[in-house]
Amino acid sequence: MFVSVSAQAEPRDLAQASQAIDRFETSLLAVMQSADRLGYSGRYRRLQPEIDRLFDFRTMTRVVSGPDWNDWDDGKRDRLVDAFRDFVTATYARRFDGYAGEHFSIDAQQQVSGGILVKTRLVRTAEPPVELDYLIRDTGRGPQVVDVFLAGTISELATRRSEFAAVLRRDGYDGLLTAIRGKTTSD
């Protein structure tokens, strides 16, 4: 899943990757603090521009689609990228639906074979922290997320690719598009 990077990351690159994640998590925390007032649709609207800026959805959608991506024309690819973007935004709007004193902590950033890994934690008051690690690449639009790892090891893209491969085998492109759109609901 990782693509090799030939050059070592400069300290500036590491700092920019961390700053991008810090900005995102600051926005996410603000949404969590206003979650009840905003409701699902308000959380979605507030998160959408931040998520769109930070995530490289074209790369992510290509990865989760697997080799079928190469068989589709640009129109089909664009529709799938848009649906996956909406799905990811909806997932964040659903998961971060309240505030109970949590805060985010950036613990480290390091060069890995696929880019820069920014290791963070969502620190909760009554429960153990949740590790959220972001794989970042500079895509020409600045540092962008190409994968998220839960608990340091569970790749969101690998999970989705497995799930989507089954849908593609069974229902083809139209079935996958319908399935992704179906997961983009409020509750």
Image (cartoon, rainbow, N blue to C red):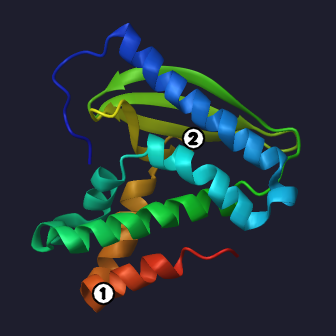
Task: Name the residue nearer the viewer: 99 or 2.
Answer: 99
Residue 32, can we see it? yes
What count of labels does the image hold?
A: 2
Horizontal and vertical percent position of residue 75: 22, 72
Task: Name the residue nearer the viewer: 83 or 67.
Answer: 83
2 or 1: tag closer to the N-terminus? 2
For residue 69, side relative to residue 19 (left or right): left
Q: Quadrant of residue 103?
A: top right
Discs 2, 1 touching: Cβ within 8 Å:
no
Per the image, label 1 sits on a secondary structure element best described as helix
Task: Name the residue nearer the viewer: 10 or 129.
Answer: 10
For residue 64, side relative to residue 89 (left or right): left
Q: Residues within 10 Å of mark 1 (few under 14, many from 20)?
A: few
- In the depicted structure, whether residue 18 falls above or below residue 131: above
**Residue holding disc 1:** 174
- In the depicted structure, whether residue 90 falls above or below residue 21: below
Horizontal and vertical percent position of residue 33: 83, 45
For residue 69, side relative to residue 101 (left or right): left
Horizontal and vertical percent position of residue 107: 59, 22
Per the image, label 2 sits on a secondary structure element best described as strand
Which kind of residue does numbered mark 1 sit on? Asp
Residue at horizontal 26 percent and vertical 82 percent from the top: 173
Q: Quadrant of residue 129?
A: top right
Residue at horizontal 46 percent and vertical 15 percent from the top: 15
Residue 150, can we see it? no
Q: Gap in Å between the C-alphas at discs 2 and 1? A: 32 Å
**Residue holding disc 2:** 132
- In the depicted structure, whether residue 157 falls above or below residue 143: below
* Quadrant that contains the C terminus: bottom right
